[in-house]
Amino acid sequence: MIKAKRVYDPPGVSDGTRVLIMRLWPRGIRKDRVDLWLKELGPVVPLLRAYRGGKLGWAEYRRRYLDGLERPEAQEAVAQVRTLARTGTVTLLCGCPDEARCHRSLLRKYLLD
């Protein structure tokens, strides 16, 4: 099972393996709140800045993020998450406040397809 959650939400007993999927470590989060940090599953910084700065719409951000998952280093991280999910629950963590407009929702769907 693969779930998605905001890294600032309290850890839950049903979270399983908590995987941070951000390029940069989130402010105020202790290392013990995360089991695994897979930076390669986060959007590259220029893409994230362009989206947050209003230079890209959601559709273009979504397309570019998903294209970026095809990089070999991202595919290694994807394989890690899929392996973990075969034996237990994995919770993808990101700092974005709106899950509907966050790469964690895109990645979750990508992993489940």
Image (spheres, grey):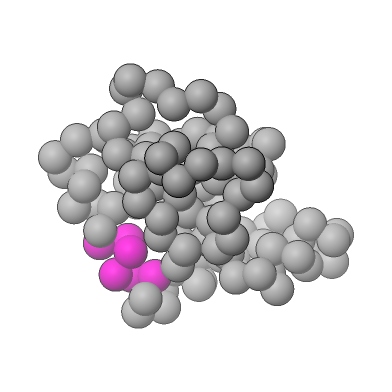
Q: Taking 83 as reference, is 12 left or right? A: right
Question: Does the stretch in magenta take in 57?
Answer: no
Q: Taking 19 as reference, is 8 left or right? A: right
Counting from the top left corner in percent of width and height, residue 70 is at 41, 74
Counting from the top left corner in percent of width and height, residue 110 is at 40, 53
Magenta stretch, residue numbers: 74-79
Residue at horizontal 60%, vertical 70%? Answer: 44
Q: Based on the displayed image, in which of its 4 quarters is residue 65 positioned?
A: bottom right
Residue at horizontal 33%, vertical 64%? Answer: 77
Going by the picture, which residue comes out furthest to the right?
54
Q: Based on the displayed image, in which of its 4 quarters is residue 96 positioned?
A: top right
Query: Is residue 33 at least partly visible in the picture?
Result: yes
Q: Is residue 87 above or below residue 113?
A: above
Counting from the top left corner in percent of width and height, residue 102 is at 61, 47
Q: Quadrant of the N terminus?
A: top left
Q: Is residue 50 above or below residue 81?
A: below
The foreground one among 85 and 66 is: 85
Q: Based on the displayed image, in which of its 4 quarters is residue 52 positioned?
A: bottom right
Q: Main secondary structure of the magenta part?
A: helix
Residue at horizontal 45%, vertical 67%? Answer: 40
Question: Does the stretch in magenta take in 75?
Answer: yes
Q: Is residue 43 above or below residue 2?
A: below
Query: Is residue 109 at least partly visible in the picture?
Result: no
Counting from the top left corner in percent of width and height, residue 73 is at 37, 76
The foreground one among 29 and 54 is: 29
Q: Taking 67 as reference, is 48 left or right? A: right
